[in-house]
Image (spheres, rainbow, N blue to C red):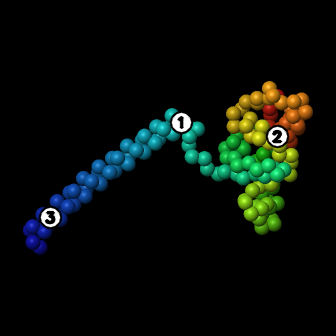
Amino acid sequence: MNPNVFEELKRANTLLENNFKTYSNKIVGRTKKWDQFDNQYPKFKLIQNLVNLNVGGYRFTVSEEVLYSEPSSNLKQIIADSFKICSNNNNINNKNGEIFIDRPGKNFSFLLQYLRTKESNSNNLTLNQKIEIIDECYYYGVNITI
């Protein structure tokens, strides 16, 4: 082999190794920065496992994390049961991939907001609305004080 070709290959290999180390260090640095961001701002993590619900004709998209955040709730079981019923019919209730829950849906957003924030802002609700919300929370097994 020609000594000049060998030296050129050796220099190219060294250059590639140096570039690889440089880019590897950049990737490690970016990974550390991303981990720091995740630790500093946990609410900004990417949401996975979104669930599309149709509750009495009202449509909601919510993360599993929110749906199952109340340990005493039976939301998980209700959704699982609804999914089993739909799966037996070879669909998920409809073409949109929604899980249908046959309950009044007009106050479900209040329940979801409570699951997200653990706060029940009921100052502007009528007595009738409060009774409806309490009834729905009881059905879903969500302990809330209004």
Of the pair 24 and 132, the residue shown nearer to us: 132
Residue at horizontal 75%, vertical 56%? 98
Q: Of helix, strand and loop, which one carries label 2? A: loop
Q: Position of residue 17 (x, y in %)?
A: 25, 56
Q: Earlier in the sequence, mark 1 or mark 2?
A: 1
Q: Earlier in the sequence, mark 3 or mark 2?
A: 3
Q: Of helix, strand and loop, which one carries label 1? A: loop
Of the pair 112 and 67, the residue shown nearer to us: 112
Q: Earlier in the sequence, mark 1 or mark 3?
A: 3
Label 3 sits on what residue type?
A: Glu
**Residue 30's image quarter?**
top left
Q: Of helix, strand and loop, which one carries label 3? A: helix
For disc 2, the marked residue is 107
For disc 1, the marked residue is 41
Instruction: Tell me the CA gap for discs 1 and 3.
Output: 49 Å
Instruction: Tell me the CA gap for discs 3 and 2.
Output: 73 Å
Q: Which mark is residue 8?
A: 3
Q: Which mark is residue 100?
A: none
